[in-house]
């Protein structure tokens, strides 16, 4: 094999190794909403609260409690009682989320009412993409629920927590998080599949020698092999 052909072969090999490594990179994750309610109302609990940063309340009320104010589960900062103090449980609706075709994860904490023996419920939904009812007993502690949601085409949706009941005692809500998971664009940007990369790189082999220095550690070893081959020839 001539020196020129050796360089071409090495360039293609290094490029393929690089492409394979990039192809296996973890996909980007983007947090679209992460709300623990702790900064609401200056960190102070209040009944019938509707000044949320990321949410609006309709068709009833919710209470912002905790931090020593009707704090049924101390140590959790502020959290939301989904049945406020007007005998009409509220509907919490998040700001609109712009969603592209992708996989998403919805995560939130729910606890029982911690006041009476009633079983409380809440309907959780993300437009037509997801809907589920959750029911907890009085003394159930904060429990994290995680659900995967698939979006097939670009859309705009909101997360909705719709409390049930009207006795001023509802489920407790905290730590709502909505994350965009695997999408078509990985961390390093759009990449070809390894098979497509091989075809493209093969076609560029004659001008690919310039790529060698860009692959730091492997490049050094590659240059050494080229020189060694040249000396043997």
Image (cartoon, rainbow, N blue to C red):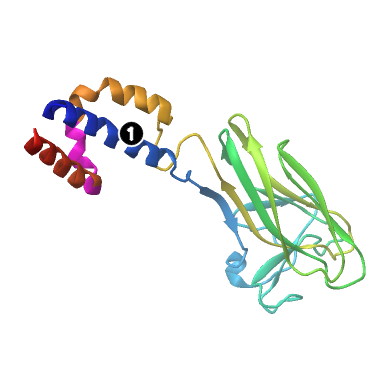
Left or right position of 17 against 171: left
Q: Position of residue 74 (x, y in %)?
A: 70, 78
Residues packed near mark 1 inside 10 Å, few (<14), some (14 to 19) or many (20 plus): some
Q: Within the image, what quadrant is residue 97 found in?
A: top right
Q: Is residue 26 visible?
A: yes
Residue at 90% in and 71% down: 116
Left or right position of 37 against 138: left
Left or right position of 138 against 40: right
Residue at 21% in and 35% down: 211
**Residue that mark 1 sits on:** 16
**How many numbered discs?**
1
Residue 96 or residue 178, whichever sits in front: 178
Q: Position of residue 171 (x, y in %)?
A: 80, 62
Q: Within the image, what quadrant is residue 12 found in?
A: top left
Left or right position of 12 against 220: right
**Span colored in magenta:** 209-217
Residue 17 or residue 127, whichever sits in front: 17
């Amino acid at each position: 094999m001539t020196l020129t052909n050796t360089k071409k072969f090495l360039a293609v090999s290094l490029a393929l190794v690089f492409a394979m490594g990039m192809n296996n990179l973890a996909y980007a994750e983007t947090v679209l909403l992460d709300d623990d309610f702790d900064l609401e109302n200056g960190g102070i609990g209040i009944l019938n609260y509707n000044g949320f940063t990321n949410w609006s309340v309709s068709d009833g009320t919710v209470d912002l409690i905790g931090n020593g104010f009707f704090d049924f589960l101390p140590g959790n900062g502020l959290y939301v009682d989904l049945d406020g103090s007007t005998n009409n449980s509220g509907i919490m609706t998040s700001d609109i989320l712009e969603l592209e075709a992708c996989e998403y994860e919805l995560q939130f904490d729910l606890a029982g009412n911690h006041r009476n023996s009633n079983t409380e419920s809440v309907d959780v939904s993300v437009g037509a993409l997801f809907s589920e009812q959750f029911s907890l007993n009085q003394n159930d502690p904060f429990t994290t629920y995680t659900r995967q949601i698939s979006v097939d085409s670009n859309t705009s949706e909101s997360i909705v927590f719709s409390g049930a009941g009207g006795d001023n005692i509802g489920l407790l809500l905290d730590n709502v998080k909505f994350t965009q998971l695997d999408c078509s664009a990985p961390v390093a940007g759009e990449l070809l599949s390894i098979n497509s990369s091989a075809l493209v790189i093969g076609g560029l082999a004659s001008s690919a020698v310039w790529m060698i220095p860009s692959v730091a550690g492997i490049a050094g070893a590659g240059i050494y092999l080229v020189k060694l081959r040249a000396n043997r020839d």
